[in-house]
Amino acid sequence: MDTSSIIQKIKENKKQPNLRYRLKKKTEAFTDLLFLTLFDIETPVAENLEKLEVQFDELVSLACWDVKKPCKQIWQNYVSTLPQILEKLNLDAEAIASCDPASLSIEEVYMAYPGFYAIAIYRLAHGFYGKGFPMVPRLMTEYAHRQTGVDINPGAQIGDSFFIDHATGVVIGETAVIKNNVKIYQGVTLGALYVAKNLEKTKRHPTIEDNVTIYANATILGGQTVIGENSVIGGNSWLTSSVPANSTVFHTPEIKIKTSRRVS
């Protein structure tokens, strides 16, 4: 097959008319500038909001595929929610700083904690979710996922003062509901019992009530599963049914240690 034939075959198999990878890079640049605008004390807010609006217009041109959706109106509505999002993120940072004895300052939380960064990008992406503009919030949280190892779907509903400790390997599904003052550790999964396309509009992921702590590598599955308030879920637990309030759930593996007599 000659070169012209190869090129023609490749073009014939490019079947997705909206698949423009520069959307991904532009979304990452937009996310970086948005994060800096909210947190970096030296970043000029007014100037950056103008830059962000320009960048957002570029994202609209690349990702607003439904011409009936007024995507340009989303920005003005979104900007008005930024003070509230920032207030929530400050509560998250304060929760981390007050709970983690390893944190030396709250500035360290903002700059060095992957759990906080993942929560921040989730909250910023969630503001776009459900606005007829689905690709950009998904790309934002995937950007954070790639950097932190934390996979939070932008559709999840997360309350105030959320703390992810150590972060890596956490998965939070699209229809998960997490209420206030919840703390989770690395490797926790809030997932679905099984995956099927016809479940797209149903609640597939669990609800976590107030003041729950979920330790490392616990897996909680199912849209009807509710973890009651003030409960503690131990590490490596596997749950597919609800837990009453004020419960402690723990997994007890059998560990055997065999010690051989030392031979000199």
Image (cartoon, grey):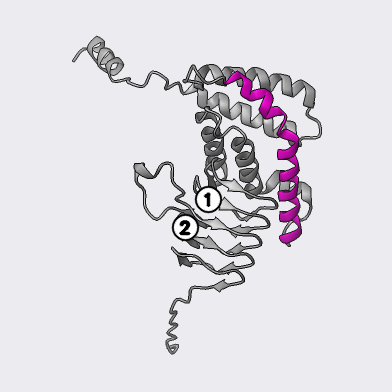
Q: Within 10 angstroms of label 2, few (less than 14), some, or many (20 or more) residues?
A: some
Please tell me the numbered disc located at residue 176.
1
Residue 13 is drawn in which quadrant?
top left
Please tell me the numbered disc located at residue 224.
2
Examine the structure image and report whether residue 10 is included in the region drawn in magenta.
no
Q: Is residue 186 visible?
A: no
Residue 143 is drawn in which quadrant?
top right
Q: What's the residue type where badge 1 is placed?
A: Ala
Q: What's the residue type where badge 2 is placed?
A: Gln
- Secondary structure found at label 1: loop
Horizontally, residue 252 falls left or right of residue 210, namely left
Image quadrant holding the C terminus, namely: bottom left
Where residue 254 appears, x then y in whole percent?
43, 79
Query: From what the image shows, is residue 58 above or below residue 153?
Result: above
Q: Which residues are magenta?
A: 71-100
Q: Within 10 angstroms of label 1, few (less than 14), some, or many (20 or more) residues?
A: many
